[in-house]
Structures are given as C-alpha cells and as structure tokens.
C-alpha cells in the first residue's frame, strides 16, 4: 500500500529506501544516493527525488536487471533489461538479425535533443532511466525520471510502435512531469501533448509526410472509436474519475488520439513558429506546477495575438467532429464554381451544429490548378470562385490542417 494524496495537484519531493534480495536491483525515482549490503545478504537502495512531483509519478522496479548506460550532455541515461537465464532479454536476436536493445533505445539521445530544440526547454531532471517489466498493465508509464515499459511493447511490436512508445514516454518529462494536469478532467494536456510529440519527433527525423501520416492515422482511429462510443465527451472531460476508466479504450482514444490531432490543428491555426513559442511560455511559466486548458489557451493567444475562444470551445470543450458534404455546380458561361458545404454531424448539447473551419480548397481544371482560402462557419455554407475552366477535381483541406473531419463529395 502507498498511502498518499492520490491527486495530481499537490507536488512533493520523495525518497525511497528499497530492500531487495541478493542479486536483485531496485530502480527508483531520482538519484541513487547509496546501496547498502545488509548482514542477511539483502541490499538496500536509497533513492532521492529532490524535485517536487505529483504522487502518481512515484514508482520503483525490482528484479534481476542488467543496466546499459549512456549520457546526454551531463544527464545519465540508464536502460534496464531483465534477465532470463544467462543473457538479458535485450540481447534477443530478432529474425532480421537486429537485437532488441538498440532497436528500442538507440534514439533516446536524439529524442532528448529534438525535444529540447522544439520546446526551447532543457530536459528538466537529472537522470532518465527506462526499465522493461513483465505483466505491466499499461504499454508504458512515465514515472518521474524512470519510465516503465511493458516487455510486450518493447520486444513484440513493430519497430515503429516501439519508437512511438519511447518518444511518447520521454515527452511526458515536459508534458505531465514538468507541467502536470491540475485534475483528471485536464488529462488531455498530458496525453494529447505526449501523443502529438510522437509525431513532432517523426517530423524532425523523417519529414513532414511521416508527421502527417501519424496525425492522420491517430485522427482516423479516434473517429472509428467515436462512431461506436456510448460516452462521447470533449477533451476536457468534466466527469473524469480517478480510476482505470480514465484509460479505457473510449476515453483513451479521445484523450490521446483526438488530443494529438487537435494540437496539430492548433499549430496550423496559430502558425508553427507561434505554436512552439507558446509551448515554451506554457512550460516555463508553469514549470514544476499544475496546468489547466486555460493556461495553454492564454499562452497560445499571447504568442499568436488571436482570440482562440472559438477554437478551444469547439475542439476541447465540445465533443465530436464535423462531417462535411460538398456539392458543386459549375457555370461554363461565367466560369464560376459554386460550392455548397453542409455540416451533417448530429448536433446535440455536446456537438456543435456548425464548426468553424478555416481551410484551403484546391481546384484543378484542364487549364491549371488554383488554391482558394475559405472559412466555413455555418451549418450550410456557400462559396463562389472564378476558375480558368471546368473543374476536374475539388479537394477541401488538401494540406490536412484539420484531420478530424470527414468529407463526402457529391
Ligand atoms: Zn502517456
């Protein structure tokens, strides 16, 4: 039992004294101050985490472990693999000849550098360990300074998924551990950002197309879950309860997948440069403290100079997403294209009847392509464009600023 104030809004330092059997290792939060060999053959590990943190980030892992060490700047990095027989499982050779250890962890240093560069905030703690455990209830858990990962995720999933898991948990060092959601209704600030940062890392190392693919797949997975959901709610989840239901597939698809996709749309709305400047303000202003959605909105408004009330209302506090039906009519005499965009999502107390959707429209015709900028504001919106010829193809939001939508062309 761990008697504690089990709510994220009161941070405290922690200290762990863990006695284990001979041959076992204990990995705790923060710095290992000392290891004591006891007369009865047991060993006691003494860890101290001098930076205040929420109680849910407290952890320790015990087992027969082999440690692989590395450093990033002056930060020690540890990779702990448990042993089965003589060899640590990290040396398992995969069918393609690679070993699991470098596959899972080789990018950690690069991820630290990318996240520091994107956020403008140095890694906030004095060590980063990653441990692999058996029979874990989650894929990974961002326990402070020592992420815990399920062996099933590290060893038995495709390489790309492992990369996303490692980058996701590391991102929590900034989003979740440095600034922490104030209550469980605001959990999306932790998980939406960690999911978005998976894509942001991919953009830096693999390029924009891979970033968009990740965002698109997350958005589509969310919409598939939403279609069969009986408990639809906004990213801000008023009725959130501090139990395992927070992470059931329905709630996780909102908090993680919709959260990541909405942060992408926010980035596109305010512009990439403003977005990262605002992220920097948000992290620095609230470091080692707790945050709520209003804090993110304030930072984004300050750096963009725009009122984002409508954006946060429809994407964070409301539920659902727009389902667009597009009709077109072309007048060859006047060379005019008329577009009618109808929002067909079922409107209710949680879902807006009309989302506000600024986007680009690409129109191809035999005489060339053109791009128009529109802002859909009403349930039924009409637009008129002069074109150079009869349109052969019309595409809304071709640059995928708003992945959370469906579009049907009639
Ligand atoms: Zn997470």
Image (cartoon, grey):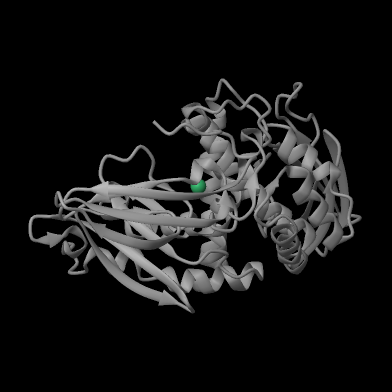
* The N terminus, quarter of image: top left
- Left or right of residue 9: residue 199: left
Is residue 188 shown to the viewer in this render? yes
The quarter of the picture where residue 270 lies is: bottom right
- Left or right of residue 386: residue 324: left
- Left or right of residue 404: residue 362: right
Q: Where residue 385 sits: x, y (%)?
A: 87, 55
Position above or below: 5 against 392? above
- Left or right of residue 8: residue 247: left
Q: Which residue is rendered at x = 54% and y = 54% of the image?
A: 172
The extreme bottom residue here reads 73
* The C terminus, quarter of image: top right
Front in this rendered view, residue 341 or 69: 69
Is residue 157 shown to the viewer in this render? no
Q: Which residue is rendered at x = 41% and y = 71% of the image?
A: 76
Q: Where residue 104 sits: x, y (%)?
A: 33, 63
Q: Where residue 327 sits: x, y (%)?
A: 75, 40
The quarter of the picture where residue 323 lies is: top right
Position above or below: 84 against 351? below
Position above or below: 86 against 184? below
Q: Which residue is rendered at x = 58% and y = 52% of the image?
A: 52
Q: How many marks?
A: 0
Front in this rendered view, residue 339 or 317: 317
The extreme left residue here reads 86
The extreme front residue here reads 39
Q: Where residue 103 sits: x, y (%)?
A: 30, 66
Front in this rendered view, residue 154 or 5: 5
Front in this rendered view, residue 133 or 252: 133
Q: Which residue is rendered at x = 69% and y = 31% of the image?
A: 319
């Amino acid at each position: 039992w761990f008697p504690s104030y089990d709510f994220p809004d009161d941070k405290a330092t922690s200290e762990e004294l863990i006695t284990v059997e001979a041959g076992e290792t204990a990995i705790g939060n923060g710095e290992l101050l000392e290891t004591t060999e006891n007369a009865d053959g047991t060993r006691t590990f003494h860890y101290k985490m001098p930076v205040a943190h929420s109680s849910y980030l407290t952890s320790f892992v015990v087992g027969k472990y082999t440690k692989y060490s590395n450093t990033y700047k002056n930060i020690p990095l540890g990779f702990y693999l448990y042993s089965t027989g003589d060899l640590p499982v990290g040396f398992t050779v995969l069918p393609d000849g690679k070993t699991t250890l470098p596959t899972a962890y080789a990018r950690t240093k690069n991820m630290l550098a990318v996240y520091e560069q994107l956020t403008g905030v140095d890694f906030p703690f004095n060590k980063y360990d990653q441990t692999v455990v058996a029979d874990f209830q989650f894929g990974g858990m961002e326990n402070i300074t020592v992420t815990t990962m399920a062996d099933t995720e590290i060893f038995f999933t495709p390489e790309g998924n492992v990369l996303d898991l490692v980058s996701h948990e590391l991102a929590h060092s900034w989003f979740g551990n440095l600034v922490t959601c104030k209550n469980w209704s605001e959990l999306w600030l932790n998980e939406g950002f960690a999911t978005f940062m998976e894509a942001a890392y991919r953009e830096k190392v693999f390029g924009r197309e891979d970033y968009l693919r990740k965002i698109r797949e997350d958005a589509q997975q969310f919409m598939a879950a939403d279609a069969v959901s009986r408990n639809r709610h906004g990213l801000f989840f008023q009725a959130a309860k501090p139990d395992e239901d927070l992470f059931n597939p329905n709630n996780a698809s909102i908090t993680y997948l919709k959260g990541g996709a909405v942060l992408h749309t926010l980035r596109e709305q305010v512009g990439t440069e403003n977005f990262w400047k605002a992220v920097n303000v948000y992290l620095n202003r609230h470091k080692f403290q707790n945050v709520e959605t209003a804090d993110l909105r304030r930072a984004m408004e300050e750096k963009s100079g725009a009122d984002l009330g409508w954006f946060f209302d429809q994407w964070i506090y409301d539920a659902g997403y727009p389902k667009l039906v597009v009709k077109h009519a072309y007048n060859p005499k006047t060379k005019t294209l008329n577009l009618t965009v109808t929002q067909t999502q079922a409107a209710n107390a949680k879902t807006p009847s009309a989302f506000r959707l600024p986007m680009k429209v690409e129109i191809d015709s035999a005489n060339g392509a053109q791009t128009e900028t529109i802002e859909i504001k009403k349930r039924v919106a009409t637009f008129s464009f002069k074109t150079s010829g009869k349109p052969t193809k019309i595409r809304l939001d071709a640059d995928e600023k708003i992945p959370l939508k469906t579009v049907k062309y009639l």
